[in-house]
Amino acid sequence: MRTLSGWGRFPRADCRVIAPKDEAELRGAVASASSAIARGNGRSYGDSALNPEATLLLRHSDRILDFDPVSGRLEAESGVMLADIIKTFLPRGWFVPVTPGTKFVTLGGMIAADVHGKNHHRAGSFGDHVESLELMVADGRVLRCSAQENAELFDATRGGMGLTGVIRSAVFRMVKVESAFIRQEIVRTRDLAETMAAFEASQEWTYSAAWIDCLARGRNVGRSVLFRGAHARAADLPAGQHSNPFVFAERHPRRLPSGFPGFALNPWTMKAFNRVYYAANRPVSGIVDYDRFFYPLDALLEWNRLYGRHGLLQYQCVLPKSEALVGLTAMLDAVARAGAGSFLSVLKLLGLGRGMLSFPMEGYTLALDFPANPRTLDLLSRLDAIVAAHAGRVYLAKDARMRPEMMGGYCGLPAFRKARKAADPSGKFSSLQSERLGL
Amino acid sequence: MTTVLIVGARSDMARAIARSYARSGCELILAARNPDTLTADIADLKLRHGAAARAVAFDVLNTQQHGAFLGSLGTLPDTIVCVVGLMGDQAQSERDVTAADLVMRTNYTGPALLFAEAANRMAARGFGRLIGVSSVAGERGRARNYVYGSAKAGFTAYLSGLRQRLAQAGSKVQVMTVLPGFVRTSALADMETPGFLTAEPDEVAAAIRKAEAKGRERIYVRPVWRLVMAVIRGLPEPVFKKVKL
């Protein structure tokens, strides 16, 4: 028995953890538990990968099984870490088709949460690049799922939060790149309308995402720093680097000490940070390495401790484009009114979604984080109401507290339930989250 | 090219160690009772690091065959890492002689006799490196795991004696004792351990490679364990008897 939590360190639960070494052990673990959920590196924020009866830890199944250097087709066990994939294949000229904001996630976790990245408007979510996967279902069979075989189960599993079974391995396609660098442009906007216009104007860029100053009030509401980028070609690099485009000075990550006091993050420090951050990011263009562009927070290991011992609540929602201006303004107003302030607030324009339980849909997604406390819980309920009123939805991989009614935003839920029922009639695969939301 | 034999290759620690050597361009031989279970590991080493790697069958308990096994490898490997370990269930080991015997033979007799055979062959050749992954549990027998701990204590003592013998004989064969402390492996998945005392498998591999480079012969993976074990060893028996550790 071990006390586990998601990345937000809220909630915590005592779980029986089983780390199966191979297929036979996994089958044994699945057979002996009446309820179980797979867990990768524990980077979903809330209770998606917690099951007190049996939490199946897959991060030790991390072998790379096959790679085709012509097509970029990669097959790996689900526990392989994104950081390892990049470290192995980027020097050979290949990058992942989609990456979330941390590289400390497993392949299985990326598929289960159907993660998106700064290129969602062009590339879709990670699941869109998965060709096939092997899934152990409730009766212990391992099913190969792809667009041709078990297609419905394939759709339900990409974004299915582990509720269809345990992903054993997957095949996806990497993309060819010429360097380890991103050609980046920084655009500063003065309000929300300008920010949204900047996103629309950035549709041709491979990557775009904005940090939004959620403490700005009045006519500054929604002011942002938009980062847009594209993989740099070797020719884009400074003269000295043309011949070794994959070499850069690696950062040495620092670790946040345990016991970091939660009060260090308060409305005053947050406001100061937001001001300085906005002012410091002058509109420029330049070349940055992929690590700094995609994973700024990975430089601070265990940054989740920043919020003190009670943990943090991350809130990420998406609103349809047509509702975004009004809805986001209302949300930012609610946040500012609560004086809560989030110092990592990210806005991004998403492209079309895949349905079922996958989070992305066309519109604007906003991610905020707050210390876990009763005031935050109240605020998030108010944000839920705004999201629901504007036909939006909340991201399950970040959620730790929402109520079942909020699942109304997922129009693919009935189809998901049908597919899950067919593969797992007794509902063996479940998490504290799936029980809370009555999935 | 340096050839490294890893015995007990199915463990998470062994996989991290194999990857570390593969990254340095070594040739890997992975040994386990059933080499078919290592197919994915061999592919992984080749794909990640372009390493030459193969799997061989080996049973550490079959001590009569250790010599024949080493002979069957063709050339004697430059380095042999023994990651064999079986924690067993302490309560069961207390009741059941067969279970306790298996823990003892797996952690002590098997690895020690393999190294006995390998050391003689390496000494005759004139060079080689033996790396034994033992345990801090062998530093002082404790109620919660003394069957395992005593076997690891035996292995640690064996490595120490072997190292002294080879040094006094003027041999260039190196012997390293590795004391990992808690490691976040599948075996410990369900155990609550203090974070600052718990290493990732990759850390064990890194510590071994660093010790190799510096010529260190007895290492704790996380330095804090040196202090922790000094305190535990230093407790007077009347006190030790009463504390729960």
Image (tube, helix red, strand yellow):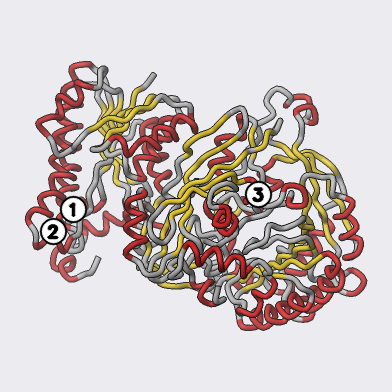
Query: Given contact means CB atoms under 8 Å apart, are the residues at marks 1 and 2 in contact?
Result: yes
Which residue position holds label 2? B93
A202 w.r.t. B125: above or below:
below
Coordinates of residue A395 in the picture (x, y in percent):
65, 66
Q: How many marks?
A: 3
Amino acid on which the number 2 mark rests in the picture:
Ser
Q: Is there CB contact under 8 Å for labels 1 and 3?
A: no
Quadrant, the N terminus of chain B: top left
Mark 3 or 2, closer to the camera: 3
Front of the two marks 1 and 3: 3
How far apart are the two marked residues, 3 and 2, measured between alpha carbons? 51 Å
Let me know if residue A225 appears in the view.
yes
Residues at discs 1 and 3 both on one chain: no
Of A417 and A436, nearer the camera is A417
Residue that badge 3 annotates: A128
Q: Residue shown at 80%/43% (left/top)?
A: A184
In what element is the residue under mark 3? helix
Residue A18 drawn above or below residue A254: below
Disc 1 or disc 2, which is closer to the eye? Answer: 2
Subunit under mark 2: B
In the rendered structure, find residue B148 and report the number of the disc placed on it: 1
